[in-house]
Image (cartoon, rainbow, N blue to C red):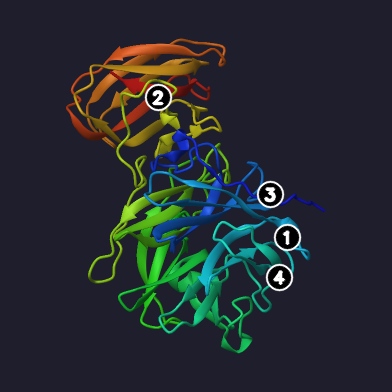
Amino acid sequence: MRRILLTVAMTMLTSSMAMAQNPILLNRAYNSDPQARVWTIDGTPTLFVYGSKDEDPSYYCSGKYDVFSTVDMIHWKGGQSFTSEEIRYNDEALYAPDCIEKDGKYYLFYSQPGPDPEGTAVADSPYGPFIDGKPVEHANQIDPSVFIDDDGQAWMFWGQFSAKCAKLNPDMRSIDPSTIKDGIITEADHHFHEGIQAFKHNGTYYLVFADISRRGMPTCLGYATSNSVTGPYTYRGVIIDNFGCDPAVWNNHGSVVKFKDKWYVFYHRSSQGSNTMRQSCVEPIKILPDGSIPEVEMTSTGAGKPLDPYLAIGSDPVAGRACYLTGHSRINGKGELESIRDNDTAAWRDFDFKEGPRKMIISLRPKAGGVIEVYSEYLYGAKVASFEVPEGDGKTIITLEADIDNVPAGVRPIRMRFHGKEDHDLFTISAFRFQ
């Protein structure tokens, strides 16, 4: 059986991770299933993100949890907060968590495969270390979420395909089984797959969840609303869809939170051509007066400023911030764009061209070689640059330059289309910039 040494490491993240652009913890932390919480710490409103942690493309999650926090949506700090070593009865992988504060204590709700799939651990700090893992009896599926209503009553939500909820007892570590209600949302009526989150806004109860309404895969975060915590809930639509972040993407999981008078949706994207190696991302959203949440698209900017197109190559792995891919191409563990084949595309949203660029520089490793066409529109538009890439050994980095025309100053996306020999890997893009 696997045993993992519990350690706690809280460190300020490096500058490449500290920007609020997507992914928010670029290429350093494969944190998925982000559950966001806002608490005031030492007088400062602070946003915390709890999530599971991927470590291998061949399986979901691991035996570790991290927690990260920010006071400004730009700089993040955090580290390991919990491992399965603290769960004496089950050392399986840790799936999607949630955390809630009550009377100065922080309760981490975790989930695992096997018997007793849901449990809690407790800490004096939102960073942990969380200790004393115990099962939550009668909660027999994964993906817990906890919500405290205006009257102080805490509720726990969980489940797959058919969501359940129940009142939490005053100890915040067990539920009242007489209050369990099944089917508050279902796959048949609400497209619910798993990964639920509950919150309340203007008297309306919201459930956010992995939504299977498109393509038969839970790549969307959908939501449903009710005037009662136990329902009935009405399906309201999709908030965000992560389809296109990776050729093998299969699921999504996240949360909605209000921080400093702005609303955000946290979600994850796959990488490395796998269902896993997921990375937490964020997009600003709006909740309209009628309670609806308009759908937003994935971006490279997230809650941060637009990307700097003039950064020196290597100062930011901008290739890894691609927010939409088609075909076979994927982002690897170095933040590069690899496995590029004929007719694949990649897009970045958005760059802040403070003045119109005159030249584009790409650093890449050629293999079969081919052509890179560059466009300054997300989906359509005129070609603004083109690169002829020679054949290579797939290991040696070369730098190519091309003149670029008709890109006026302003904030705009960049899209690339790739051409070359069919069924061949053409090249790997390490970085690019503009002059």
Residue 234 percent across, percent down from the top left: 37, 75
Of the image marks 3 and 1, the number of the one nearer the N terminus: 3
Q: Which residue is mark 4?
A: 134
Q: Which residue is mark 1?
A: 86
- Front in this rendered view, residue 276 or 14: 14
Of the image marks 2 and 1, the number of the one nearer the N terminus: 1
Amino acid on which disc 2 is placed: Phe
Of the image marks 1 and 4, the number of the one nearer the N terminus: 1
Left or right: 79, with 402 as reference point? right
Residue 138 percent across, percent down from the top left: 67, 79
Amino acid on which disc 4 is placed: Lys
Q: Which residue is mark 2?
A: 418
Residue 8 percent across, percent down from the top left: 64, 50
Left or right: 346, with 110 as reference point? left
Of the image marks 4 and 2, the number of the one nearer the N terminus: 4
Q: Quadrant of the C terminus?
A: top left
Q: CA distance from mark 3 to mark 4?
A: 19 Å
In which quarter of the view is residue 363 placed? Answer: top left
Residue 385 sits above or below residue 243 on the image = above
Which of label 4 and label 2 is nearer to you? 4
Which of label 2 and label 3 is nearer to you? 3
- Front in this rendered view, residue 98 or 220: 98
Q: Which residue is mark 3?
A: 7
Amino acid on which disc 3 is placed: Thr
Is disc 1 placed on a helix, strand or loop? helix
Is disc 3 placed on a helix, strand or loop? loop
Total labels drawn: 4
